[in-house]
Image: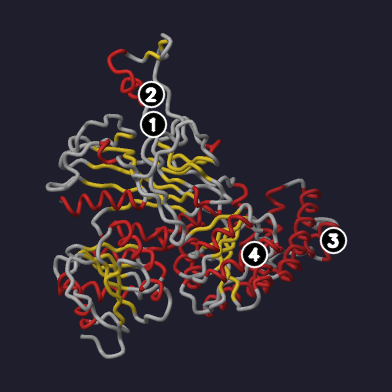
Amino acid sequence: MTSEGWGTPPVEPISQHYIVCGGNALAHRLVLELVEHYEVPVVVLVTDRTRDHAPRIEEIAGVAAVVEYPNITEEALRAVSVDTARGLALVEGSDQENIHAALSAQGHNPNIRIVFRMFNQRLGENIERLLRNGAALSGSATAAPAFAAAALGRPNSVEIGGRYLHIAFDDAITSDRICVVADHIDRQDLSKIRLLPEQEGDSAEFVRLATEFGDDGPVRPGGVRREAAPGPEPAPEPGPVRGLEPESERESGSEPEPESGSEPESASEESPGGIAALQALRMEPGEPISWARRLRWRVLDTMRFFTSARMRLVLLTALAAVLLAFSVLWYLSRDFGWTVYISLLDLAGAAQPDQQADIAAGTGTGGAWQRVAQVVITLCGITFAPVATAIVVEVLGSGRRGLPRNPSAGTRDHVIVVGLGNVGTRVATQLHEMGVPVVCLERDPQARGIAAARALGIPVVLGDGPFEEQLRRARLKHSRAVVAVSGDDATNLEAALEARHGNPEVRVVVRLFDDNFAGHFYKTLDNAASRSVSYLAAPAFAAALMGSEVRGTLSVFRHALLIAELTVEDGSGLIGLNRHDLEDPGGVRVIAVRFTRSNQLHWGFADRTRRLTPGDRIVVAATRSGLARLNTVLVEEG
């Protein structure tokens, strides 16, 4: 029993359930995934029933119980019946707390499936080896590619078998598309989007005619015979067709999703809005930044990092004087090698001056102009030494104080990342690795991402002042995008609106959980994108809890398309199914198959009748409900 005042354990004994530990946004989305799409009993363990998303989790229909404990202790695990549970998801707390809870749960139930959130992915991989049936995932690592790609104005990609899958929209769709993944795209009303709509196959017209006219063939009334055009069958055009209406993948809080058995749409109806298709590239889309621009960024940024404005003025003036004096010496001597030699000696203060007797005898090394040039070079050399010493002392002192550097006056075409939590740190790191200049903005001087930014040399603007001033210091006027990824929707929206006010042309990417915020955001701002970390990560956590591997998540505005790889094992419910069985009634597309006796991945495998055998692997693009259906087959029949 729990202590008085700390909640109530399940009133009735419960078994074969799933436990979610946490009351944050990810826990909220994960509970919705398990209850709505997998239809499994869920018990939630929270630290405080009145904070974060815990009150909203209690209101979800289908949650068996919400139990409150300040920590995940042995008593707390017994209160949520961990001994009879099928799975446990740890999505809140530090890495150390989640590791301890995972090992404790395995001690109570050796067969339980454990999925735990870890920021340190390398440590998570090592902990997986200590668990019999566990998986370590990072919500920030799952969502960060979508934010980084949105900041650069390009679709994020998922690598499968040496190809990079991405989403293309409307005119960007090429003839080598794999499948249509969305239609009815209307930016003013994103609830109309249909993910993985039912599409007619290449032979759908012939099958329909044969069904209609039977053995007489495709003959229309009046004796007009419809002949099939010679040559290969045309590829199906995207848009609504006859068949089952697919489930519409919506954010929580939107209108209820239509059932897969709802009335079909007329085939003659025009598809409003745009469409999106899944395509594969041979290589990952590169950032269109030339090496010359990157070199210029590095040189200017390095110079401004090591020097202040006054020091730069002194150094540039001295350098100009040295070059002018060098030119004079070269003109008088007509010997480039000797000019370099004497100039270096003068800079070091070691040149041999002309003696008065030599000058009187006419045996001096040069005339008056040469002596003036040498004096100028020597004086400039004296200037360089203390300036270089001051620079070194300043750099070493800043490093010892552990202070991040401020953005330099030459920062251009950069991305401003607002918030250095887990997600912000991942996004900034990924953009930095792409060679894109990054400036971070953080109000909390103790944020965990500040040390990571300093280690990478990424400028950070610290302070709790108004966003207008902070963004100005972050060089908003010269930035290409602003990514607001703090943990608060209102803060992110404020940062986005201030950024757009300060620079109407800047691209804005905002992390939002609330659907109403997201809807108004898309309707109000152009050149903007909204992403939800929990919405992108929750399907991967739910699939992992059921034993599947989600390779990545692709974004279609606020909607998520999952790329998963499934292995057909002995006893699996997938054995004996063919492509038609997997894709009907919708929500799933088989995009690649790897057979047991072949290591080759077959893209767009056309044989819809071949049945799966043990050892086969399939790659699918699926909606949340579609992947849940496949996982249900694995769990119930496997």
Q: Is residue 480 visible?
A: no
Taking the view exactly as shown, the residue that stands out farthest to the bottom is 4
Q: Is residue 450 left or right of residue 363?
A: left
Please state which of residues 39 and 283 is positioned toward the viewer in this rendering.
39
- In the rendered structure, which disc, 1 or 2, sits on the residue that comes first in sequence? 1
Query: For the residues marked 2 and 4, what is the alpha-carbon distance in whole angstroms?
Result: 50 Å
Q: Are marks 3 and 1 in contact (CB under 8 Å)?
A: no
Depicted 2 relative to depicted 226: above or below: below
Q: Which residue is mark 3?
A: 359
Query: Of the residues shown, which amino acid type is indicated by label 1?
Result: Glu
Residue at left offset 35%, top offset 75%? 94
Do labels 3 and 4 touch, CB within 8 Å? no
Element at badge 1? Answer: loop
Residue to which mark 2 is pinned: 205
**Residue 67 in view of the camera:** yes
Identify residue type, mark 2: Glu
Report the disc number at residue 200. Answer: 1
Image: 502 above or below 249 = below
Closer to the eye: label 2 or 3: 2
For marks 3 and 4, the one nearer the N-term is 3
Assess whether mark 4 and mark 1 are in contact (beta carbons under 8 angstroms). Answer: no
Q: Earlier in the sequence, mark 2 or mark 3?
A: 2
Q: Earlier in the sequence, mark 1 or mark 4?
A: 1
Q: CA distance from mark 2 to mark 3?
A: 104 Å
CB under 8 Å between discs 1 and 2: yes
In front of the other: 35 or 287: 35
Crowding at mark 4 (Cα within 10 Å: few <14, some 14-19, many 20+): some
Closest to the camera, between mark 2 and mark 4, is 2
Q: CA distance from mark 1 to mark 2?
A: 8 Å
